[in-house]
Structures are given as structure tokens and as C-alpha cells.
Amino acid sequence: MKKTLLALAVSTIAFAGSVNAAELYSSDTTSVKLSGEVDTYLKTGDLKFEGQPKDKSDPNAAIWAKTQFDVDYKISTNNTAFLSFEVEGDGDAGAKFDDVYAGFTNNTFGTFTIGEAGDSFDALEKTDITNEGIYAGTIESEDSSNAIRWQKAFGGLALSADAQTNTDSDDNVYALSGDWTITDAFSVGAGYATSGSDAYTTALSASAQFGDLYLAASASQYKNFGGDFEFTGETEKTFNVDITEGNTYGIAAAYQMNETRFYGSYALVDDDTDVKFNAYTVGIDHSIIDNVLVFVEYTGVTGDDTTGNDTTGNLYMLGAYLTF
């Protein structure tokens, strides 16, 4: 089979969900809502390969925006159809559609979604608590293709199953996960994904809330289920390695003090090809009002590529999320 390549995004936009969506239209059977977001950043960074001078970037500004439409159709007391899509862009390449999906919810059988429906490992990303930092606590099952997904909650147990479909020579990806909220303060999750006869990933995660303190840990094992691990550091150079078989580990902690949150995370990718990748993020964010969040964040990476060369990188970021 052709090896399944799943990219791990390490410097991408993180959605800061809208607090209140505006209702554009409402009737007994149909509801249309609009929400949106503008993300602004000032960032700089550097990247150094072994035996080469450090490559630095000057502070630069960036912006990204999205508008999201959500539509619900009330078919009956127990059945609802829905659709959602986003229009997003950064001002350079024009706007594009993203996260387009439609589905159907039955109160007995659960929710069925088709399109860019996410993947069953979403619930396992308990260590993904930063704003723009690196997440690598689990090898995810989601790729760039569309999916068919089922979700259903049984009390405190939330189940999800999905099939990420491909039209080319790559195999489809099938995943299953369960997330059990044992108490209001503690939850555990587990997942399994496979693609073909010799590609799989398994993952475990747990989180605990002690008052204002949040703690989480995650781990995964993968085979032929890796991808490109890339860090640009906001410079012209890029640290990029292929991971194919190994383990990932992640830990995270956050402390909430009124409207201010202090947080940090650490991730390790330990591949059998001698590739090692460490990433750590620390930050502070503050909610000025419900729809405005500002943050300052630092991310550092260290790694060895397949040739054993050491690489270090740093990314400094000041940002704000404005939502409606």
C-alpha cells in the first residue's frame, strides 16, 4: 500500500470560537446563524541548523479572518438536519471555503456528518491548550479529504467513528474513539485508527481539573501513520522531517486567575528512524471582554533529523482574537 501521510500542523491558526452567534433568520423549522473571527499577530522567530548560522526574522504582522454560517432544519421533535461552512482568508491569497459539512441528528441514533467533519481523535487532544503553539500529543487520523462521521453520547461516554475517504491511491482512514467524563473534574479518552493492513495509530489521553488548575497528558503509538513535521520559525528556512513509526507524548497545564490564564505544554515525537522532536510552549492570555482575547506566547523546538543533525528554533508571538 502507499504510506498514509498525515501532516502535523505546528504553526497554524487556532480557532477561538465565537461566544454568541447572530441569528439572521428564524422560523418554526429553520434557523440561520452568523459568527466570525479576526485574528491578528505580531511575531518573530529564528531557526538554526547544526553547523550553520542562525536564521532570524524581523518582527512581522499577520492577520486572518473567517465568517461562519450555521443552518439548522427542524424536521421533527427527534430529527434535525444541519449544515455549516466558513469563508476565510489572510488578505493575500483571497478568500476560500473551509470546514464545509452537512449532517443529520436523531435523538436516539446520534449525529451523522459528511464533509470536513473533523476526526474521532478530536476528543483526545486534551493537551492542545495553547493559542498558537505546537500540538503533537497524538498522531491524528484526520487528513485533507472529506469524511463520514458518527457521534453519540451515552451519559458521560462520548463515542465517535469516522471514515476519511480518498479518491487517489492513498488508503482510506478509519478511526474510532471514546471519551469518558468520569466526573466533572476528570476524563479519559482512547482511540484507534487504521489505514490498510500495515498502518495504524493508537492513542490515550487524560485530563483533570482541580479548581482553577487544569492538567492533561496524552500519548500515541503509530506505524506507517506519520507525516511531515515542519517548523518554520517565521524565517525563510524550514525544519522538516518525515515520521513513519514511533511514539508521541504530550503534557499540558494551565492555571486560571480571574480573566487571565497561564499555560504551558510539552510534546515529544520519538520516531524509530532516529528522528527526535521536542516542542514546548508557554504563554499568558487575558479575556478583555467575552469576545476579545489577547495573548503573548513563546514556542521553542529542538530536534534531530534523519542524518543526526541538531536543529533549534524559537517563535515569539503577540496576538489577539476578536470574535462575534
Image (cartoon, grey):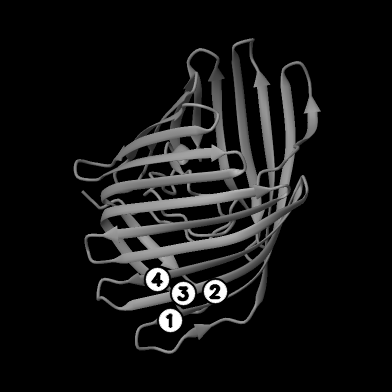
Mark earlier in primary sequence (2, 1): 1
Q: Who comes first in sequence, dot 1 or dot 3?
A: 1
Label 4 or label 1, whichever lies nearer to me, is: 4
Q: Which residue is mark 2?
A: 234
Residue 95 visible, this orientation: no
Q: Tell me the CA gap for discs 3 and 4.
A: 7 Å
Task: Look at discs 2 and 3 and give the one toward the viewer.
Answer: 3
Residue 152 position within the rendered picture, expressed as x and y whole percent measured from the top left: 48, 22
Residue at 48 percent across and 15 percent down: it is 109
Q: Answer few, some or many: residues within 10 Å of disc 4's Cα (few below 14, many 20 plus, some between 14 and 19).
A: some
Vertical side of 54 occupied by 178: above or below: above
Q: Which mark is residue 85?
A: none
Q: Residues within 10 Å of mark 3 (few under 14, many from 20)?
A: many
Quadrant of the drawing holding the C terminus: top right
Q: Is residue 288 above or below residue 305?
A: above
Q: Nearer the viewer, residue 194 or 99?
A: 194
Cβ–Cβ under 8 Å for marks 1 and 3: yes
Do the residues under discs 3 and 4 have CB atoms within 8 angstroms? yes
Residue at label 3? 313
Which SS class for mark 1?
A: strand
